[in-house]
């Protein structure tokens, strides 16, 4: 936790909420004290932070002003199959019952976060889920909005495993009262705009803190690790601490903005992996023929329909518009001094729109935002541009790195490739407060991807349930099973400090001794009997026995390839170093 | 009573009408399943009288180059059941709200003209807030209308922004690639509002940190058709036949074409069944196996016999020749940081000299600063950021020296931590002394450090393993046995086959890896150890090679235009983007346990 807090202070990782104060109020206070321009406001905020009159929220996460309050979930199963440490979500986010028995142990060992007693339960005021099926996240949400299925909407789909782009399209309109995600958020935007005049009568400014980002000049921000909060350097936004930006918001026009392609698009062009592609003339041509949306006396390309959004994405994507691909190589040529545009010359006239893709899937075009070369039907393989055309990797030396010399890697002994054994059961703290009950076995609990479902989807599908055992079973080795008197299809209870699973066993010699497999991920709507060990509360799913543990070295930032990028960098969660005790369920399962 | 007619007159085959009716349709529309299976299969949806009746695999993918098997048909038994959901009892048909909250809301709303005030009233009353919170997950949903549902949500959003700030609102949706417009709908709304969006790739433990560590890139991998180009496929932590259903055929077709398929997996999984060679490495111990493989490759293909393809590859495309300072602190020597070009008088005046690095050049016999460093990318004069082996200062050709062993000034005993036995080893490393702004420094190359780290002896220096059978010395084939349960001879044979194939084919060996390895706490180290094997054999950046990590539908195309739209960058910037693991670790109070 201390490293997490340091990582936020130094700008290595983002963290929201940002401060222990409303960012809108921060600006209001700055203005009251005479700061007017963006630069003056930023200076004022830096001084406040330096003097500790304004604190990062991460330093005091249990203070009520620092909780996240509203959680909107869509296209997701955020509360069970995606929730590492599911039972802690139930307790601290939702404030409902949970099956964790873990004792808090961080008091005293964590220095940088304020310790508040007791830990807060029920931080979330409102949890909203957009869903087409009643999955576990929907079951736990306050409001469930019916969304369209994949056969009821227009959308785009791509993957790592093939090089085509192809659509989802509406075979039938959304059934019953369901709406597409695009329509739902548009309607919510309209509602927010309609209700906002009393709360936010005029546009306001919001101060936004963001971390040091990869593929920007932030790659050169921190040659060494220095903490301004330890007096080792001055707090400088974008250098030794997070960037600060002032952003204007206007909730009254939020709906109009949602529905129209704004002016910054033309001015800024588009960017990926540090490649900026100017689009001015292409934009003008597009705007002339695209559907229009007019508000406040100005005309914009329309984003009212999902298909408008899809066509905008396709028109300005270097993978779907040959002219954009060509320009991406022009941008890369300016950076590298290499000749590269020949890779896109032959595709320059190609452009896919939504109707093209509905007719037939299309291959993505070779471009500088990716590293493969797919011309002439060649299969995509990564880093071919680096090898064949001498484009550098986006690392310190520009080469592939076997050696990592960030100070954190030196400190953790990970500068060279090395081996660290898996975390032991003791070190995992999974079983610190759990006791063996009768004939019991400790197993490493692995949660791989299963055969009868994709994550949790299809696990509740009648057709798949008919083909499989109709339940998500717990796999263990035959000799292990014999030791605790478990036969195939018996009910078992697998538990640790985090939570408990009650299900049937599959006994099989294909599983090695000492290991169990519980495939990711069941739903609470199918076969979750009660757990005698947890006062007959209902058992949980895959993530009931997991807990988040962050590896500090992966928080390193502000240094070459060790820079943050959303979804692309940072401490990844892990779930395999998980241990459970398993016993045969006493008596019959209770429902 | 049609079955009686079938008995009386079987030739009429009236029972067939049932099937004809079942598969009737009047419309066929293309769609797919946004489920993050990574298959991204195109499906044809059949509709009769406005009802979805069934789906079938599309078979019109454009062909790739001649000689490759086709992609089609794609699709799996899970996907083909999807139409069940559309009209299933699980389908959410109307806006729903938990009864406790609905009653509380309606009472508060009746007392307040402004919905935001109504929400404030509920929030200000700890008891009313607790009442609906504790009911979460316990059923009790009631049907409501769109207008009421959206009003509550909008009121809560505005209340939160006014009282606490818009950054107290969080949104979560994963894997935009599976339906990127739908993702963009929510993210666009939330960014215009000022809310934070939570990441998923790292939260799912699917993001491989070794990828940015090695390549500065989140994930960039081959499409499955390229497996066919591989001559040696190692599948590890990836159960191809079970979880890559529409793609697995390329691995099987490659096998029929002469490729060897080796599977590392602790259990006898579906892909183990198809393997030419199944190596049941103990779970979570993969790096020990690969470290020993690397040891054998270095010894046999880099020291005993110097494989030209491998050496040239490392010189141009890896950091192996770059100079690292050996820090002498008392008795101890440790590998330190890269030597910065700016520390040398020759390069003292270059822009971003602290961010440019040095190799030892065989031509001039001096340290030289090749192009391509990150300092060249972000300097004012552009056009020098490339991998040409030229001195950025005067464009002179550079021939980087991989090892200083032959020309060393001295040999220092450097300490390397050994986490397998919670100890350390000291091994001799060749160094040269270089005069810098910080005084005389001992430097070595990354390549020399690798030799020492892996314990590959090249001379009389101390601390090295005797031979492959030295079980106490990391990282020999014998040493790894106690962690992996795999015999030393298996490792040796595997390394020889792997590197031998790479040498003969110009790097056509691939590692297909997935969550079975990536979901471990030390996943980055498991990955780096296998990446090292690929890099030492020149297998990255060639068709049929590479570390191909597949855990989810991470490849969003086109990202540039999509992100502008999805993050509402057409109106304002920067967006609030939050890494999920940190958010949940802190806010769900898991840090306290």
Image (cartoon, coloured by chain):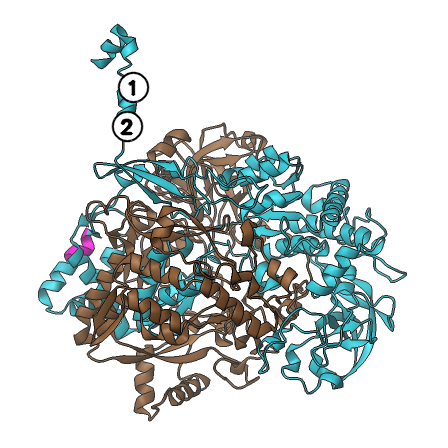
Mark 2 element type: helix
Q: Does B520 appear above or below B364?
A: above
Residue located at (49% from left, 61% from top): A105
Residue at the disc numbered 1: B16
Would you say residue A465 is visible in this rendering? yes
Residue located at (45% from left, 28% from top): A489
Q: Chain of mark 1?
A: B
Would you say residue A63 is visible in this rendering? no
Q: Does B433 appear above or below A454?
A: below
How far across and down, in percent of the image, does residue A461 sit? Answer: 34, 37
How far across and down, in percent of the image, does residue A150 sit? Answer: 32, 46
Name the one closer to the observer, A295 or A205: A295
- N-term mark: 1 or 2: 1
Q: What shade does chain A have?
A: brown
Q: Chain of mark 2?
A: B
How many other residues sit within 10 Å of disc 2, few (<14), some (14-19) or many (≥20)? Answer: few
Q: What shade does chain B have?
A: cyan
How many other residues sit within 10 Å of disc 1, few (<14), some (14-19) or many (≥20)? Answer: few
| The label number, if any, that marks residue B22 in the structure image | 2
Question: Does the segment drawn in magenta span residue A525?
Answer: no
Q: Does A581 appear above or below A370?
A: above
Mark 1 element type: helix
Name the one closer to the observer, A138 or A433: A138
> Mark 1 touching mark 2, by CB under 8 A?
no
| The label number, if any, that marks residue B284 in the structure image | none
Q: Which residues are magenta?
A: B99-103
> Which image quarter: residue B83?
top left
Q: In the shown orientation, is residue A168 left or right of residue A276?
A: left
Name the one closer to the observer, B550 or A222: B550
Going by the picture, which residue comes out furthest to the bottom? A34
How far across and down, in percent of the image, does residue A565 sit? Answer: 49, 67
């Amino acid at each position: 936790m201390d490293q997490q807090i340091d990582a936020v202070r130094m700008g290595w990782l983002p963290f929201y909420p940002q401060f222990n104060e409303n960012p809108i109020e921060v600006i209001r206070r700055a203005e009251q004290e005479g700061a007017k321009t963006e630069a003056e406001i930023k200076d004022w905020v830096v001084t406040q932070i330096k003097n500790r009159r304004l604190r990062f929220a991460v330093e005091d996460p249990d203070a009520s002003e620092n909780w996240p309050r509203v959680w909107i979930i869509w296209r997701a199963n955020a509360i069970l199959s995606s929730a590492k440490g599911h039972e802690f979500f139930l307790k601290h986010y939702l404030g409902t019952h949970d099956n964790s028995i873990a004792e808090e142990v961080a008091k005293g060992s964590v220095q940088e976060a304020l310790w508040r007693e007791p830990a807060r339960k029920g931080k979330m005021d409102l949890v909203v889920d957009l869903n087409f099926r009643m999955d576990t996240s929907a079951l736990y949400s306050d409001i469930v909005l019916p969304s369209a299925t994949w056969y009821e909407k227009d959308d785009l789909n791509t993957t790592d495993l093939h090089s085509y782009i192809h659509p989802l399209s509406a075979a039938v309109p959304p059934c019953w009262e369901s709406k597409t995600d695009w329509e739902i958020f548009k309607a919510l935007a309209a509602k927010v705009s309609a209700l906002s005049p009393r709360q936010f009568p005029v546009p306001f400014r919001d101060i936004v803190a963001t971390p040091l980002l990869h593929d920007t000049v932030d790659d050169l921000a921190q040659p060494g690790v220095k903490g301004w909060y330890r007096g080792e350097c001055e707090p400088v936004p974008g250098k030794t601490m997070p960037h600060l930006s002032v952003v204007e918001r206007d909730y009254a026009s939020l709906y109009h903005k949602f529905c129209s392609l704004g002016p910054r698009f033309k001015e800024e062009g588009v960017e990926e992996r540090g490649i900026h592609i100017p689009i001015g003339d292409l934009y003008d041509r597009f705007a002339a023929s695209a559907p229009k949306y007019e508000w406040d006396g100005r005309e914009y390309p329309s984003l009212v329909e999902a298909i408008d959004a899809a066509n905008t994405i396709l028109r300005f994507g270097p993978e779907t518009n040959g002219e954009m691909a060509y320009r991406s190589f022009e941008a890369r040529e300016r950076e590298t001094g290499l000749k590269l545009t020949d890779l896109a010359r032959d595709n320059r006239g190609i452009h896919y729109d939504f109707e093209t893709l509905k007719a037939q899937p299309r291959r993505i075009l070779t471009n500088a935002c990716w590293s493969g070369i797919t011309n002439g039907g060649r299969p995509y393989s990564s880093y071919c541009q680096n090898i064949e055309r001498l484009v550098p990797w986006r690392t310190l030396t520009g080469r592939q790195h076997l050696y990592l010399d960030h100070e954190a890697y030196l400190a953790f002994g990970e500068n060279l490739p090395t081996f660290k054994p898996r975390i032991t059961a003791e070190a995992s703290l999974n079983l610190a407060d759990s006791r063996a009950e009768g004939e019991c076995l400790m197993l490493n609990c692995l949660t791989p991807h299963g055969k009868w479902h994709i994550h949790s989807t299809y696990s509740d599908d009648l057709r798949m349930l008919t083909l499989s055992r109709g339940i998500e079973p717990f796999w263990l080795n035959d000799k292990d099973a014999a030791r605790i008197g478990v036969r195939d299809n018996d009910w078992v209870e697998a538990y640790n400090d985090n939570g408990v699973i009650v299900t049937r066993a599959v006994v099989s010699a294909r599983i090695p001794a000492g290991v169990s497999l519980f495939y990711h991920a069941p739903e609470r709507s199918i076969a979750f009997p009660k757990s005698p060990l947890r006062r007959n509360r209902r058992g949980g799913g895959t993530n009931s026995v997991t807990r988040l543990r962050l590896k500090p070295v992966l928080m390193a930032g502000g240094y070459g390839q060790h820079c943050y990028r959303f979804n692309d960098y940072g401490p990844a969660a892990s779930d395999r170093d998980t241990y459970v005790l398993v016993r045969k369920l006493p008596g019959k399962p209770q429902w | 009573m049609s079955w009686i007619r079938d008995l009386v007159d079987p030739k009429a085959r009236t029972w067939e009408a049932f099937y004809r009716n079942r598969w009737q349709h009047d419309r066929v529309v293309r769609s797919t399943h946004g489920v993050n299976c990574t298959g991204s299969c195109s499906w044809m949806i059949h509709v009769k009288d406005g009802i979805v009746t069934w789906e079938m695999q599309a078979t019109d993918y454009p062909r790739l180059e001649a000689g490759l098997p086709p992609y089609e048909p794609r699709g799996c038994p899970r996907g083909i059941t999807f139409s069940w959901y559309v009209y299933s009892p699980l389908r959410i048909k109307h806006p729903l709200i938990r009864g406790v909250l609905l009653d509380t809301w309606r009472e508060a709303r009746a007392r307040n003209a402004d919905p935001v005030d109504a929400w404030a009233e509920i929030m200000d009353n700890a008891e009313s807030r607790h009442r609906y919170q504790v009911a979460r997950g316990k059923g009790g949903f009631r049907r409501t209308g769109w207008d009421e549902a959206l009003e509550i949500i909008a009121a809560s959003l505005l209340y939160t922004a006014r009282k606490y700030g818009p950054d107290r609102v969080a949104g979560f949706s994963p894997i935009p690639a599976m339906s990127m417009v739908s993702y963009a709908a929510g993210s666009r709304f939330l960014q215009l509002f000022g809310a934070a969006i939570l990441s998923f790739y790292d939260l799912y433990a699917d993001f491989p940190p070794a990828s940015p560590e090695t390549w500065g890139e989140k994930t960039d991998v081959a499409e499955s058709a390229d497996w066919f180009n591989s001559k040696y496929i190692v599948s590890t932590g990836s159960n191809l036949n079970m979880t890559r259903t529409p793609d697995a055929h390329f691995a099987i077709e490659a096998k029929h074409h002469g490729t060897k398929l080796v599977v590392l997996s602790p259990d006898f999984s579906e892909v183990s069944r198809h393997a030419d060679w199944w190596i049941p490495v103990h779970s979570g111990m993969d790096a020990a196996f690969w470290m020993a493989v690397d040891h054998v490759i270095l010894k046999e293909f880099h020291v005993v016999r110097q494989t030209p393809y491998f050496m040239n590859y490392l010189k141009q495309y890896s950091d192996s020749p770059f100079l690292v300072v050996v820090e002498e602190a008392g008795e101890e020597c440790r590998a330190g940081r890269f030597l910065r070009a700016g520390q040398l008088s020759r390069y003292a005046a270059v822009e971003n000299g602290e961010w440019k690095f040095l190799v030892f050049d065989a031509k001039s016999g001096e340290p030289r600063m090749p192009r391509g460093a990150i300092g060249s990318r972000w300097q004012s004069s552009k056009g020098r950021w490339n991998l040409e082996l030229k001195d950025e200062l005067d464009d002179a050709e550079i021939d980087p020296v991989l090892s200083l062993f032959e020309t060393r000034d001295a040999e220092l005993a450097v300490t390397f931590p050994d986490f397998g036995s919670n100890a350390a080893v000291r091994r001799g490393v060749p160094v040269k002394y270089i005069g810098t702004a910080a005084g005389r420094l001992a430097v070595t190359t990354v390549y020399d450090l690798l030799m020492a780290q892996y314990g590959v002896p090249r001379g009389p220096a101390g601390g090295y393993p005797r031979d492959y059978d030295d079980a106490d010395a990391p990282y020999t084939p014998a040493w790894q046995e106690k962690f992996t349960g795999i015999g030393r001879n298996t490792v040796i044979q595997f390394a020889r086959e792997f590197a031998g194939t790479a040498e003969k084919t110009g790097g056509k060996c691939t590692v297909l890896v997935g969550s079975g390895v990536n979901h471990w706490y030390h996943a980055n180290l498991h990955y780096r150890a296998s990446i090292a094997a690929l890099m030492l054999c020149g297998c990255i950046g060639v068709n049929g090679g590479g570390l191909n990590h597949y855990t989810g539908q991470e490849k969003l195309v086109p990202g540039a235009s999509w992100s502008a739209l999805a993050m509402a960058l057409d109106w304002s910037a920067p967006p609030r983007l939050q890494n999920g693991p940190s958010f949940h670790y802190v806010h769900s109070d898991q840090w306290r346990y």
